[in-house]
Image (tube, grey):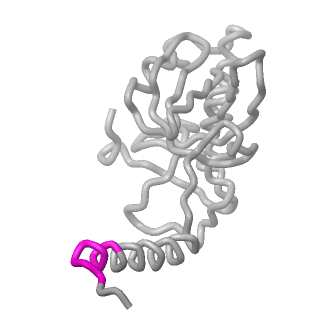
Amino acid sequence: TKKNTFLEEIQDKSDAKKLRFSIEDDKQVIKPLTYQSLEQGMVVMGRIREISQYHMFVCLPGRLSAKVSVAAISTPYTENLKKLQNLELTSKECPPLTDLFRVGQAVLCSILEVKREGELMSVSVSLEPSLVNSERSHYTLRTGQTIQAAVCTEEDYGYTLHTGVVGLTTFLSRNNARR
């Protein structure tokens, strides 16, 4: 048999190492997010890219983009919009999206719909806490943990929050709230 050269020995070791890693990597393959891999009900972290009067655009991982309708923010906000439309509330009591969110803000989104419009893909998402937190249980929540919520009512010393988690009542004191 012919003796391997130094470079061939290094290459053989490198190939063996690559093979070992590829076998181990097959166990936990993380695939990139694509329009084809998005499914209804999937919860995805995104960043707000643009805010208008009736919707927001959110950047999702994998260079994907989604649209959030003003009616898909939260149940309390949708109820306030209906009251505003019926002239039961003033515009001050139901602030616009630009007062509630900021460009660059991280949000959890629940995929509502993925559809093809010609050659383009359209993704609709919701920020509704009951959809975003649907897999959470109040037993698994811990002190200091962040959870997406919406303000239901303003009280004397703080805010009652809608989390969408069954069996969970939440209150945020004014001292702990940031504007």
Residue 126 screen position, x and y as percent: 65, 35
Horizontally, residue 131 falls left or right of residue 29, namely right
Residue 123 higher or lower than 31, as above or below: above
Horizontally, residue 63 falls left or right of residue 72, namely left
User: Where's the C terminus, which quadrant?
Assistant: top left
Q: Is residue 129 magenta?
A: no
Residue 121 higher or lower than 60, as above or below: above
Name the residue nearer the viewer: 1 or 153. 1
Residue, x 38% and y 91% (percent of image)? 1
Residue 38 higher or lower than 70, as above or below: below
Q: Which residues are magenta?
A: 4-11
Residue, x 66% and y 36% (percent of image)? 35
Q: Quadrant of residue 38?
A: top right
Tell me, yes or no, if residue 130 can be seen here: no
Q: Quadrant of residue 110?
A: top right
Magenta residues: mostly which secondary structure? helix
Residue, x 30% and y 82% (percent of image)? 4
Residue 86 screen position, x and y as percent: 73, 10
